[in-house]
Image (tube, grey):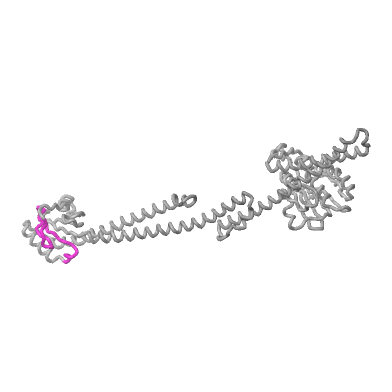
Amino acid sequence: MFKGITKRWMLNTLSVILTIIILIVVSLIFVVTYLCHRSVEQSLASTSSELSLVFSGYTSDSSTGFTSSARDYVENFDKKEQMEVMVINSSGRVVMTSTGFIPSESLKITDFEDAKSNGEGFAFWSGTLNSGESAMSETRIITNDSDTVVGAIRYIVSMDPVNNRIMLISAMIIALGIVIISLVIISGLLFIRSIVKPIRRLSVTADKIAHGDFSASEKIEHKYDDEIGDLCDAVSDMAKDLQTTEQMKNDFISRVSHELRTPLTAIKGWAETMQLSERGKLDRRTFDRGMGVIIKESSRLTSIVEELLDFSRIQSGRMVLMNEKLDILAEFDETVYMLKERAVKEGKHLLYDEPEAVYPPVYGDRNRLKQVFINILDNALKYTPKGGVVAAQVIYNKDEPDIIKIVVTDTGCGISADDLPKVKEKFYKANQTVRGSGIGLAVADEIMNLHNGSLDIESGEGVGTTVTLTFPVFKEGEEQTMPENIKL
C-alpha cells in the first residue's frame, strides 16, 4: 500500500515524530505522577511539622503521659477526613488511631524504624496496605528533653484518589498524543499525496514523451504554484522543445538526404553516360563536361560529409584544434579570393578591400577559421539574389585594442524576427528553398566559441543580413596557457 516517497516518509520522518511524541507523553505522565506524589508528601510534611509545637518542651519519660498528650492531639486533629493519624509507642506498637480501629500487631511499620534510624526524625512510606488499598504515610518521632524516643505520630493518606487523578490526567495526555499523531499522519499523508500524485502523473507523461508521444504534455495539470508546478512547466516545455527538435531533426535528415542524393545522382548519371558510350564516340567537350560535373559534385559531397563529421565531433567533444599564431587578414583575404569567381558567375558583387594597416595576430586553427569564413560568405552569396551585393571588411579599432572584427553584410532576403534567435541552433534552417543542411552555422558558431570569440547576426526580413565575427587579439604568453593541440 505504501511505497516510494510515502514509504520513506513513514520509515524516516513519521517514525521520528512518533518516537518524539511517545517520549513526550511518557515524560509528561512521569512528571504528573511525580508532582502528585510530591504534593502528597508535602501535605504530609506540612501537617506533621505542627508536632514540633504540640509536643514542644515535652519532658515526660512516661509512655502514659505521651499517650495522654497524643490522645488530645488526635481528638482535636482537624484533617481526619483527609488522612488517618496513628499514635505509636516507643516499642513501635500502634496504641491509638483517628479512626478508632487498632491495626493488627503483626503490621510492620517500616517508616517508624526508618525514622528512628535515619537521624532526621521522620520517614516516608508508600505501598499497599493489607486491605489492598494504595497509601502513603509519614512517621515523625517524638522525643523528650533527653532525646529519648517516647513514641511517634504516623499520618496515612489513601493514594487511590491520587492514582485515579494520575490515571485520568495520563489518559488525557495519551489521548492528546494520539490526536496529535493522527493529525500528523493525516496531514503528512495529504501532503505526501499532493506531491506523489502529480509526480506519478508526470512519470507516466514523461514515459509517453520518451516513446514519442509529445502530445501527452498537453494533459499535464498545473494545480500548484510551487516546485511541483515548476516541474510541470519544465516537463511541458521540455516536451515542446523535444517535439521541435524532433521535427528539426527529421527535416535535417530529409535535407541531408536530398543534399546527398542530388550530387550522387549527377555523378552516377554522368558516370553511366561515359561508361555506356562507345570508345571514341564521346567527344572531348562532353567528356570534359562530364568529368567537371563529377569533380564538382564530388567536392560538394565531400563538403557535406566534412560538415557532418565536424558536427559529430562537436557534439561528442572530439573536435581537435591546431592552434598557432596567425594573420587573420591573410586568411580572410584568401577565402574571399576563393569565392570571387563564384560571385562573378552568379552575377553577384563580392566587395572587399584589404586594409593597408598591419593588424595584430590572433591565436587559433587556420583551417577551422577558414571554414567559418567560407560558411559565412557562402551563406551570404546563397541568400543574395542576382545583382545583389555582399560586402566584407576587417575592423580593428584602437578604442577596442583587444579584439578584431570581421563584418559580412549582404542584400539578400534577410531573416525574420521569429527565425533569427534560432538560426544558430542545430538542425534549424529558416529558408527551406535554399540548399544546405542547416548545421553549417551551428558548426561555425561552435568553432568561434572554441576560439573564445563570437558570431553575432543582425537581420531583417527583406533588408539583408549582417554577420559579425569577433576574435580576441593574441597576447604574448597566451600559447603557454593554451596548447596547440586541443581536444574538445
Residue 129: name its quadrant: bottom left
- Name the residue: 14% across, 52% down: 108
- Residue 117 in view, yes or no: yes
The x and y percentages for residue 391 are: 85, 51
Residue 478: name its quadrant: top right
Q: In the current view of this chain or complex, which residue is farthest to the top?
A: 279
Decide if residue 73 is on the left or right side of residue 377: left
The x and y percentages for residue 396 are: 80, 48
- Name the residue: 58% across, 59% down: 221
- Residue 150 in view, yes or no: no
Q: Is residue 88 magenta?
A: yes
The x and y percentages for residue 42 are: 23, 59
The magenta-colored residue range is: 78-103
Instruction: Tell me if residue 362 comes above or below residue 162 in the rendering.
Output: above
Q: Is residue 323 magenta?
A: no
- Name the residue: 49% across, 55% down: 192
Decide if residue 453 is on the left or right side of residue 271: left
Decide if residue 71 is on the left or right side of residue 290: left
